[in-house]
Image (tube, rainbow, N blue to C red):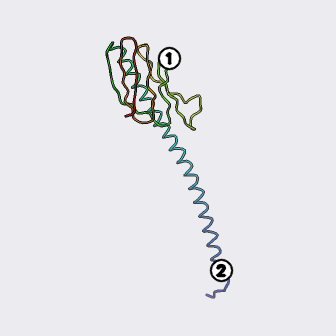
Amino acid sequence: MVRHPGDEASMRGQFSIDFFLVLSIVIAFSVLLYNVAVTEVGKSTLLDSAVLGQSALDSVASGVDFASFAGNGSRIRKELFFPQDVNCLFFNQSLNAFYCFVSSSFLPSSKNRLISRSLLSSPPMALECVPRPGWSVADFSNNGTHVVVSCRPL
């Protein structure tokens, strides 16, 4: 077989074109997979925050109900976890329930509200709790005139 001087250069040129073509396809797929992964992680984080916020709301509602039904002098303490991107412990008088707002780019503003179950009682309340992200200790007590809800970071 006779080799011509231009064949080797032609083969190297073909190899570099093929290499860059394959490399560009791999990079394009990598960028697409990265974007999908970031979106899915964001949605998963949102779901975790919503579940943790809902759990905290339900614990607060059960603590208020307990202190209300147990009567004067009753007291209960609960440990609560408030997620970073959830703003909690607002009270809706008409629904007789606590609610939170979830801040996320994955939710439309009309769907960013979490609501606890309705309170079984309708006690006058003094809400002395400003929840901060992380663990908190909440005290629910009945002083005869109203239920006091107070919390502090753990």
Q: Which residue is mark 2?
A: 9
Relative to residue 43, is residue 88 depicted above or below? above
Relative to residue 33, is residue 4 depicted above or below? below
**Amino acid type, residue under disc 1 in the picture:** Leu
**Amino acid type, residue under disc 2 in the picture:** Ala
Question: Which corner quadrant of the image does residue 147 belong to?
Answer: top left
Marker disc for residue 95: 1
**How many numbered circles are shown?**
2
Badge 2 element: helix
Q: Nearer the viewer, mark 1 or mark 2?
A: 1
Q: Point out residue 118 in the picture as x, y percentages from the top left corner.
A: 45, 18
Question: Which corner quadrant of the image does residue 141 belong to?
Answer: top left
Badge 1 element: loop
Check the picture and name the quadrant holding the C terminus.
Answer: top left
Q: Residue furthest right?
A: 6
- Residue 118 horizontal side relative to residue 26, left or right: left
Q: Point out residue 144 in the picture as x, y percentages from the top left corner.
A: 36, 11
Question: Which corner quadrant of the image does residue 73 belong to?
Answer: top left
- Please report the residue visible at 50 percent of the width from the left and 36 percent of the height from the top: 85
Q: Point out residue 65 in the picture as x, y percentages from the top left corner.
A: 38, 17
For label 2, count other residues whose C-alpha is less than 10 Å away and answer few (under 14), some (14-19) or many (20+).
few
- Residue 33 horizontal side relative to residue 69, left or right: right
Q: Earlier in the sequence, mark 1 or mark 2?
A: 2
- Please report the residue visible at 33 percent of the width from the left and 12 percent of the height from the top: 72
Relative to residue 31, is residue 64 depicted above or below? above
In front here: 47 or 32? Answer: 47
Alpha carbons under labels 1 and 2: distance apart: 79 Å
Are the residues at dot 1 and dot 2 in contact (C-beta closer than 8 Å)? Answer: no
For label 1, count other residues whose C-alpha is less than 10 Å away and answer few (under 14), some (14-19) or many (20+).
few
In front here: 35 or 15? Answer: 35
